[in-house]
Image (tube, rainbow, N blue to C red):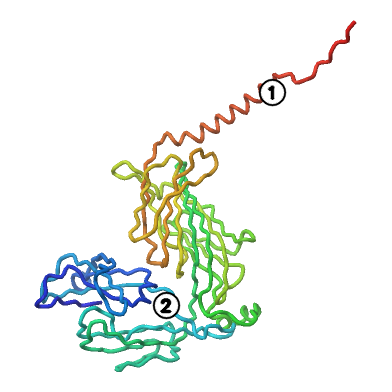
């Protein structure tokens, strides 16, 4: 939370600036802001737009500024509270960089004891909560205190604009560092009643690299100690009412998967052919079908739109590069993708069975994707129902031509007549 007060001599403030270091900005996956209204149980949170600040706004040491737009301008001496939530990826550095199967994983986390802000800060404190109580070391910036996994810095008063006090924490973190280096999801929409989804994954363990020989016997006998930072299964949260689910890698189908489905969600637990240790990779494919009526709707202006989910269905993962390809039915026109955050988009043409002119495909790309990106997005397009007759007419025409060819063949005499001898 950021209690913000406008200066007595300033003009009405329509926005609030927040600052990130260059390293944080490079790993910034998402940033959101809300303003709380009401008290206690009646408190509500109003989302506030956040966007990169005007590049002309100068900041020292390469700091990157983001602007939070306020719903009503803040008058001089008025106060409001803004809550900022942001996610940084690839911000933990394994140290040691290589560990054996029996060792725990330790990481460095770098931050500042004081808030990096373009404003004068009257009072501020920083709380760091580590995943375990094993904290090897941490930088002290008095006053500093520690209780189990919690390290508290401050409170600090009267900090100048852009004040920065670097800190490093070294602690145990055996959470699975599951990183999807590349995810390509293909969503094929058929007006005959089905949506087919195919997802290709390139996955790695992004933690401390494994060194030495892997012992499966030790891994199975002492799973709580041996390979504590490794992982052997993943959970994918899929839409409800999925069907025809499959899971395979380069070798073929993998049977070690479990699907639990109800009217609200479907959960697919998958297990690769081998557990993943630091630096290890695997590639696999997940596919499934979904009923069309759950995802295809008609807008007020007569256009159709598919309401899909962005992001990665695998829980607790980071996606370095995500590509979503929405393949529209043949004959679709004027496609438009509406995504609630910035993405790269372009169109291409895909071909499938019985296609004549190809299918318009909306391609959406984004880097640095986390769980907070798993939100709905829409793809609008125009479609004439007459195009649904194209494939049946092609099949009927092909069958008629085949029978016509058979009739012609049966009524054609292809034998060679013998020439009569002259008398």
Q: Secondary structure at mark 1?
A: helix
Q: Give the CA separation, mark 2 to mark 1.
A: 73 Å
Disc 2 and disc 1 in contact, CB within 8 angstroms: no
In the rendered structure, the answer to whether residue 268 lies left or right of residue 384 reads: right
Q: Disc 1 designates what residue?
A: 409
- Which of the pair 378/27 is nearer the observer? 27
Q: Earlier in the sequence, mark 2 or mark 1?
A: 2
Residue farthest top in this picture: 423
Residue 105: % across, % down: 51, 83
Q: Quadrant of residue 377?
A: bottom left
Q: Residues within 10 Å of mark 1 (few under 14, many from 20)?
A: few
Q: Which mark is residue 113?
A: none
Residue 83: % across, % down: 26, 73
Q: Disc 2 designates what residue?
A: 91
Q: Quadrant of residue 88?
A: bottom left
Q: Residue at x 22, y 88 (%)?
A: 157
On-image quarter of the N terminus: bottom left
Q: Quadrant of residue 15?
A: bottom left
Q: Residue at x 37, y 59 (%)?
A: 343
Q: Residue at x 32, y 41 (%)?
A: 302
In the rendered structure, the answer to whether residue 178 lies left or right of residue 341 reads: right
Residue 159: % across, % down: 23, 86
Q: Secondary structure at mark 2?
A: loop
Q: Is residue 70 above or below residue 336?
A: below
Residue 80: % across, % down: 17, 74
Q: Residue at x 59, y 84 (%)?
A: 100
């Amino acid at each position: 939370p950021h209690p913000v007060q406008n200066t007595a001599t300033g003009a009405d403030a329509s926005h609030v600036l927040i600052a990130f270091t260059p390293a944080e900005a490079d790993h910034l996956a998402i940033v959101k802001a809300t303003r709380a209204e009401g008290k206690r149980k009646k408190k509500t949170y109003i989302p506030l737009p956040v966007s990169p600040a005007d590049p002309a706004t100068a900041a020292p040491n390469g700091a990157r500024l983001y602007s939070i737009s306020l719903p009503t301008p803040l008058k001089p001496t008025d106060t409001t509270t803004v809550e900022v939530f942001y996610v940084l990826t690839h911000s933990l550095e394994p140290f040691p960089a290589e560990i054996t199967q029996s060792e725990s994983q330790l990481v460095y986390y770098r931050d500042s004891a004081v808030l990096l802000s373009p404003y004068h800060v009257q009072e501020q404190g920083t709380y760091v909560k580590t995943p375990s109580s094993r904290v090897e070391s941490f930088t002290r910036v008095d006053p500093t205190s520690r209780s189990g996994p919690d390290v508290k810095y401050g409170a600090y008063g009267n900090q100048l604009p852009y004040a920065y006090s670097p800190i490093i924490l070294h602690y145990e973190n055996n959470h699975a560092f599951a990183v999807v280096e590349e995810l390509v999801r293909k969503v094929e929409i058929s007006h005959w009643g089905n949506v087919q989804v195919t997802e290709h994954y390139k996955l790695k363990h992004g933690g401390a690299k494994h060194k030495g020989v892997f012992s499966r016997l030790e891994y199975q006998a002492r799973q709580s100690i041996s390979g504590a930072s490794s992982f052997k299964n993943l959970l994918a949260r899929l839409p409800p009412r999925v069907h025809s689910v499959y899971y395979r890698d380069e070798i073929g189908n993998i049977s070690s998967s479990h699907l639990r489905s109800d009217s609200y969600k479907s959960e697919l637990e998958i297990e690769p052919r081998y557990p993943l240790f630091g630096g290890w990779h695997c590639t696999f494919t997940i596919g499934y079908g979904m009923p069309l009526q759950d995802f295809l709707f008609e807008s007020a202006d007569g256009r159709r739109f598919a309401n899909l989910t962005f992001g990665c269905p695998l829980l607790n993962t980071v996606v370095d590069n995500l590509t979503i390809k929405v393949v529209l039915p043949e004959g679709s026109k004027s496609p438009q993708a509406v995504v609630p955050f910035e993405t790269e988009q372009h169109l291409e043409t895909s071909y499938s069975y019985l296609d004549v002119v190809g299918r318009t495909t909306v391609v959406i790309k984004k880097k640095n994707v986390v769980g907070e990106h798993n939100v709905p997005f829409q793809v609008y397009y125009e479609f004439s129902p007459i195009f649904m007759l194209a494939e049946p007419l092609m099949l009927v025409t092909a069958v008629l031509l085949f029978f016509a060819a058979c009739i012609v063949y049966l009524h054609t005499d292809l034998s060679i007549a013998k020439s009569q001898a002259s008398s």
